[in-house]
Every structure is written in C-alpha cells, then in structure tokens.
Amino acid sequence: MNTRAQIKRLIQPTVQSMSAYQVPSSAGLIKLDAMENPYHWPEDLRQAWLAELAAAAINRYPDADAQALKQQLGAVFAVPEGAQLLLGNGSDEIIQLLVLSMARPGLVVMTPEPSFAMYKMATQIVAAQFVGVPLRADDFSFDLEATLAAITQHQPSIIFLAWPNNPTGNLFDTAAISEVIEQAPGIVVLDEAYQAFAKRSFMPLLKKYENLMVMRTLSKLGLAGLRLGFLAGHPAWVSEFEKLRMPYNIGVLTQTSVAFILKHIEVLNEQAARLCADRDRMFEDLAALPGVRVWPSAANFLLLRMENRGADEVYEKLKRQGILVKNLHAAHAMLNNCLRITIGKQEENKALLAALKNCI
Ligand code: PMP
C-alpha cells in the first residue's frame, strides 16, 4: 500500500495544504506567549477546590448538557434572560462547531485581518471561503466601509469579530460593529475572549439582535487548562449548533472546577484588574524603549514592533534569555517585525523589559 498516494487521494486538498497549529515548548521559560493568567488561587481556595475534586464522580460521564453550570455562567456573566448557552471545550471548539454547522459549498466566513488564527483554520478545514478584510494600517482600527463593501460582495454566513482583537489588542468602534450586525446576511460572532480586561461587552445587545452571538472563554481569566468557552445567542440558532456538539465535551473535572471558582469570581476579577494595571505600566515602559513601537491594548497583552531589529532575531534572543513570547512576524503582512507579549507577574514583566533592552 502506498500511504503517501492514499493520503494525497483521500485527505481534503485544503487540509493537505494547511499546517497544524504549532505550540512551541515552554519548558524552563517565562511564559508570556499565550495570554494566560500567571496567578493561581489563594491556598485556602485551592484546598477547598481539591476537596470537591476528590469527591467528583470521574467514573461517570459528565452531565451532558450541564444545565446547572450554564445557569451559573448566565448569572455570573450577565447573560440576558431568554438567551441560550452552548458550552465548548474552549472557545476554539465553538468556532469549529459554528463553521461546521454552516459547511456547504459556497460558505463564506469573514473576519477583519489580522485577527485570531483559528477563524481561518476552522474555515479551511471545511474547504469554505475565508475573506479577511484588512484593518486600517497604522492603528489597526476597524474599516467599516471596506467591511460593508465586502459583506455586499461576499455575503458571509459568519462574521467573527474579536473584541478586543487578538493580536492587536484594540476594541473596534461599537457603532461600526452595530452597523455590521445590522447589515450582515448571517450571524455575527462577537468573540469577547478578553472581556475581563476590557470590561465592555455586547452581551446586553443579544436582546436587540437575533443574529448576534456573544462568545466568551474562561481561559484568559485564569482557567486555560480547564478548557471552557461558551456562546450566548438566540435559542433558535443555538439549538442548531447544539446538534453538532459531542454530548460529553465538557469533562467532570472542568464542570466541577468551574462551578467551584465561579462562586469566588471576585478572586479572578481582582487578578484581571491587577493585570490591567500592570499592562498600563508595561505600555509606558515599552513605549520609552528606543526602536520599539507599542500599541495601546484593552486586553492582557501588548503588540510590539521592532523598528530597527528583525522580530525573528529578537524572539530568539529573548528565548535565549529565558523568555517565551509570540513571534507574529510571518503571521500577516501587517504584523511585520511584530511580537506579542502577554502580561505576566511583575517580576516576569521586569525580566522581559531587561531582556528586551539587551536585544535592542
Ligand atoms: N478567541 C480569541 C480572540 C483568542 O485570542 C483565543 C485564544 N488565544 C480564543 C478565542 C480561544 O480561547 P480558548 O479556546 O482557550 O477558549
């Protein structure tokens, strides 16, 4: 049997042309690459959590529709009455479910560019058409005119808007987003992964727009390892997406842990507030470095451009000094020589600043 020939014949051509999402090893490094919260919980909370985990029924399948957890999420995150929730193994899984639910020849998925890589990946997997509408050069602001023109031309079934945007960190203009929701021929997914830092949300507008879906994740709030994201939207839409969800996608340990920590949400919110203050301090410190351009951010990361050095070189030099950041140089033409740094603990941020000074 000729395996290579079989793969060439059987695997979808677009999948063959894709590369798997690469996660570099972070062993022994200060990890400032993936927008994780660097803090754990106070010791007494950890002990109480462990006691709950010890009693968890891991011999049983998890609660398949996690009604109690959804109610708790709805209350904590102010989901309006009447909206329905869909839970995903991270919001990555929800992105994939949404695209899969509409997969057919001619499907168009649209996002501003540059933005979160998973929207494009999920689209490529189903061999649908991905349309990226460039953000404005220089400040990465949302180009409403270009977006409306692209909507008219391509008739996208799904528009993903990361708000704040990853990797640029900015919030697009709210009036422009409302206009997009009103003009879209399909659904608009407001991906509010960084809401804990931006403190602004389209959630209340679920009452106004039936084609609006608001997506959140608990990852950036400090639970990246548990994998839980959710989508809130009109029940008629969400019931369709629900059909694609594998019944036990949220494990017992995740359900138990999230139910526990949501009762202490103030701990996570305080950590987020501390990260916001440290982000603002880092912004000032980075802006003062010669040869570094930094953009304002409403999230827990900052986008930097190396103006006199190659980002590849700086990335490697930082790594040699024990710090892992995200190199975006090859990700998009508008991200030439750009790095993205996650805000960590104060000592980690200081270490990054010192290491960066050594590079420039
Ligand atoms: N949306 C955005 C905008 C993101 O930046 C990320 C993570 N980088 C995600 C969604 C996915 O988060 P998760 O799968 O951990 O919920």
Image (tube, rainbow, N blue to C red):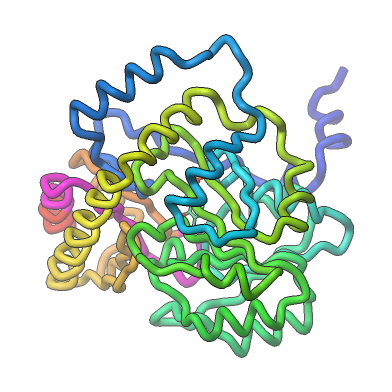
The answer to whether 226 appears left or right of 49 in the picture is right
Q: Is residue 90 visible?
A: yes
| Left or right: where 146 falls relative to 202 | right
Image quadrant where one finds the N terminus? top right
174 above or below 166?
Answer: below
List the single residue furthest toward the front.
81
Q: Is residue 347 magenta?
A: yes
Which residue is painted at 23% across and 57% down in the image?
273
Specify the quadrant of the image occupied by residue 36: top left
Q: Residue 5 placed where, x, y %? A: 85, 30
Q: Quadrant of the C terminus?
A: bottom left
State the residue at coordinates (48%, 49%).
217
The residue shown at (25%, 44%) is 267
Residue span colored magenta: 330-352
Nearer to the camera, 244 or 130: 244
- What percent of the width, then of the height, locates residue 189? 62, 63
Figure disc tally: 0
Looking at the picture, how far across and down is residue 345, in whole percent?
Answer: 18, 46
Q: Image quadrant of residue 260? A: top left
Q: Is residue 227 left or right of residue 108?
A: left
Report the residue at 61% width, 70% height from top.
207
Between 186 and 75, the one nearer to me in the picture: 75
Residue 37: % across, % down: 30, 44
